[in-house]
Amino acid sequence: MAVFVIADTHLSLAVNKSMELFKGHWSGYVDKLEKNWNETVAESESVIIAGDISWGSDFNGCEKDFEFINNNLNGTKYIIKGNHDYWWNTVKKMTGWLEAKKFEKIKIVHNNAYLCENIIICGTRGWFISGEDDEDGVSEEEMFNQKILKREVNRLDMSIQAAKKIKTENPDCEIIAFIHYPPVYGDYVCDEIIDLLEKEEIKRCYFGHIHNVNPVKIRKTYRNINFEVVSADYIKFTPVRIL
């Protein structure tokens, strides 16, 4: 059975934030997503959604989106937080809500890992550091960003350590990282994320977040790690097979 990945579904079935506003690739995107997904993914297979899943600001606002994901899209879904997933909460609250709503085909990836066929899923949201300082040194904004990034690196580390525990009993399974923000794109490199992936010998990483992707800026390989952009509009709302 196959495993797929996609990011940035940006569903808004209950709130007025449809990506239809941007036209182009986004015109009719929910219908395209459903059609392409179900033509590609079988009910017995799995899909990682690497962030920016729903525009809902809380559980009420994203319920219809999760109902759509659970009931209308084939397969088991493993979801990772994106920067626009304002509904995201503690694992306990999210798991409890999913169970109460009987969204049984959706699983949370947060400080943990899952064995999925012959791969082990780990990941986190990640963060972006601009690298720009003000005249007096590091700006307040940059200090804030560095604080968030440090937390995200710790979360990725926790997820990788959980994956390594799974791997001890499944030595032939590859650990793959899924991160919403790009660790590398064009001239930008998030060394903190890259260093951790390299240290833990993670060889594949998938990410989203970027729209209007410039193919020239895509670095397929960096420091012996393979990277792939899977933003929904870039991959034409069709999950990419990774196994």
Image (tube, grey):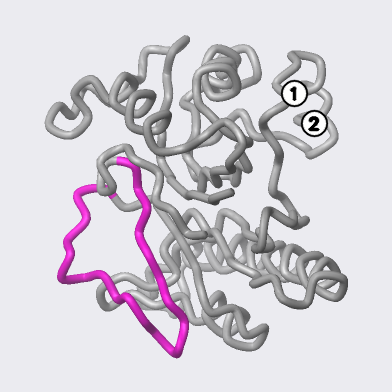
Three-letter code, disc 2: Thr
Residue indicated by mark 2: 95
Q: Is 164 located above or below residue 112 in the figure?
A: below
Helix, strand, or loop for circle 1?
helix
Q: Residue furthest front?
A: 1
Q: Residue at x 54, y 12 (%)?
A: 64
Which range is magenta? 211-232
Q: Is 226 located above or below residue 108 in the figure?
A: below
Three-letter code, disc 1: Leu
Q: Is 157 located above or below residue 178 in the figure?
A: below
Q: Residue at x 39, y 77 (%)?
A: 189
**Location of residue 32 (image quadrant):** top left
Helix, strand, or loop for circle 2?
helix
In this rendering, position of residue 203 left or right of residue 234:
right
Residue indicated by mark 1: 98
Residue 148: % across, % down: 61, 60
Q: CA distance from mark 1 to mark 2?
A: 5 Å
